[in-house]
Amino acid sequence: MNLKAALFSLIYGACRRLGYEARFHPLPFNDPSLDSALRRLSTHQIAFISLIGVGACNGSWSKAFAVRFPGKHHLLVDANRIHLPALEAVASICLTGSIDSLALAKKKGTLYFDDSDPLGGHLLAIPYNENYKPCAVNSIDDLVQETSLPAP
């Protein structure tokens, strides 16, 4: 029994004991959730091998993607190092691929990244203030080649 079914069973049983009837109403096929979007995408039979998650944050989108499209290779990229432990945990659980803590640019080098906002960030050629720290940058093409990621 999966977690959703177990939770529904618990809620259903509790409601019945209290004299209420619980009914499960699944979301419509076209609801705006990520899971629904991925479900719709899976019906199109698009052939691909790899996913590149740019700004992967904590990896939740890639994790959801891996549920709907198992066995695909993932390259998860985020410039904010605060997300690295979460990305490593996601990769160790369900993903095949690589993780890089860097920003994307036209070519390999170093720029300055403001990592003061975990859900944002700003990249500059010169540091604007003390929040801007040196950050490795690379192009997607070079990352794909360096990590031996199968072409998407």
Image (cartoon, helix red, strand yellow):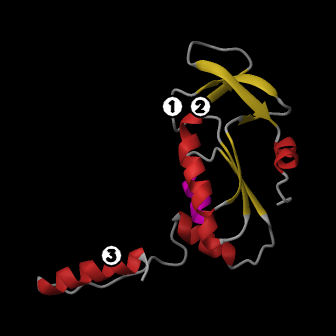
- Residue 94 percent across, percent down from the top left: 61, 63
The tag on residue 117 is 1
Crowding near pointer 3: few (<14 within 10 Å), some, many (20+)?
Answer: few
Amino acid carrying label 1: it is: Asp
Earlier sequence position, callout 3 versus callout 2: 3
Q: What stretch is highlighted in magenta?
A: 58-64
The picture places residue 151, in percent across and down from the top left corner, at 86, 59
Q: Tell me where residue 149 sits by quadrant.
A: bottom right
**Vertical order, 30 against 74 (above or below):** below
Q: Residue at x 51, y 26 (%)?
A: 116
Q: Residues within 10 Å of mark 1 (few under 14, many from 20)?
A: few
The reply to whether discs 3 and 2 touch (Cβ–Cβ < 8 Å) is no
Q: Which amino acid does label 3 sit on?
A: Leu
Residue 121 image label: 2
Q: Give neighbour class at mark 2: few <14, some 14-19, many 20+ (Cα, 10 Å).
A: some
Q: What element carries label 1?
A: loop
x 77%, y 61%: residue: 50
User: Which mark lies nearer to you, 3 or 2?
Assistant: 3
Residue type marked 2: Gly
Mark yes or no: residue 7 visible. Answer: yes
Q: Which of 123 and 6 is in front in this view?
A: 6
Quarter holding the C terminus is: bottom right
User: Marks 3/2: CA distance?
Assistant: 37 Å
Query: Could you tell me how far apart the alpha carbons at marks 2 and 1 are, in whole angstroms?
Result: 6 Å
